[in-house]
Image (cartoon, rainbow, N blue to C red):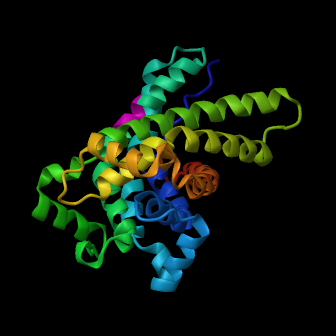
Amino acid sequence: MAAPQKRAYPFCLAGAAASMAATVTHPLDLTKVRMQTNKSARPNMLRTMVETVKTDGVRGLYVGLSASIFRQMTYSVTRFGGYEYLKGLAATPGQPLTATQMILCASGAGALGGLAGNPADIILVRMTSDAVRPPSERLGYRNALDGLVKMVRDEGVGSLFRGLGPNTVRAVLMNASQLASYDWFKAALLRSNVFDEGLPLHFSASFLAGTLATTVCSPADVIKSRVMAESKKGGNILTMLRTSLASEGPGFLFRGWTPAWIRLCPNSILLFVFLEQLRAGIDTLRGTNKLV
């Protein structure tokens, strides 16, 4: 007798779980963006965080949180939903997906997520990097909705797609490297007989996958942040690359790696823990016939 088909979970669960995780790790995301967009110095993570608290207080570490949640409810919802949908299309009954199929599904879902989340990503970068601008150039977005309205009003609808190229590349790299490497590391750790299925295994595989994904995505992430941080200056990628390479050297492509790594590892763990708990809640409601 065939096993009953597992019912799909509401697509918004991924966005909710990602938003919960982003709320915890937002100070690190803010620090990463400020390090990436600060061209006048070579700041380290701790100094950047201390300066933020000195200038704006602890609340300053949460500037742009509304944009971060906006991003998760667009980018994460789309990439998780797209990944499950594409896996369903690629699946052959009775056979597991190959690593190549999973990478392709993850890449396609990442591209869709990058497109859907691009406007929110621009607002997030601008809000978190505003403090490192000269006072006369600050944009002063009050929240994500205010930023969205001002961008369309002052720069046109096309501004919502600024940096779409590097953002999509980064989203593809992140989704593919994070998901595929997580599965590979998890299988390898299980084969080592050191780990059994459970939280220690998930933590270790997430840690290794997060490290790889951070390194792979860093150049695209830095380029994306710098292009998106521009307001009315064109944001030409090639010009920015030439200028930055000439003045800072190739090392600028990995600026902000430490806070990005520190953010991504716990963010990934929290995201999946929250997601599994939300799914367990859905299963409980289904079991009591309160949700179908």
Q: What percent of the width, then of the height, locates residue 245?
A: 40, 45
Q: Quadrant of residue 266?
A: bottom right
Please check the rendered image and state whether residue 211 is part of the magenta-colored stretch, yes or no.
Answer: no
Say left or right for 102 vs 67.
right
Q: Is residue 164 left or right of residue 246?
A: left
Query: In the image shown, does 187 or 118 lie closer to the viewer?
Result: 118
- Please tell me in which quadrant of the rendered image residue 114 appears: top left
- Up the image or down, 108 lies above or below 153; here it is above
**Range shown magenta:** 108-112
In the picture, measured across the screen, residue 13 lies left or right of residue 183, that is: left
Q: Is residue 198 above or below residue 71?
A: above
From the top left corner, tell me how far across and down residue 17 is, in percent. Answer: 52, 55
Q: Where does the image place residue 93, in percent across and percent down from the top left?
A: 54, 15
Q: Residue at x 48, y 61 (%)?
A: 35
Look at 56% across and 44% down and name the residue there.
Answer: 214
Question: Mostly what secondary structure, the magenta segment?
Answer: helix
**Which residue is located at x 50 percent, y 61 percent?**
29
Whether residue 243 is visible: yes
Outermost residue toward the right? Answer: 193
Report if residue 109 lies within the magenta region: yes
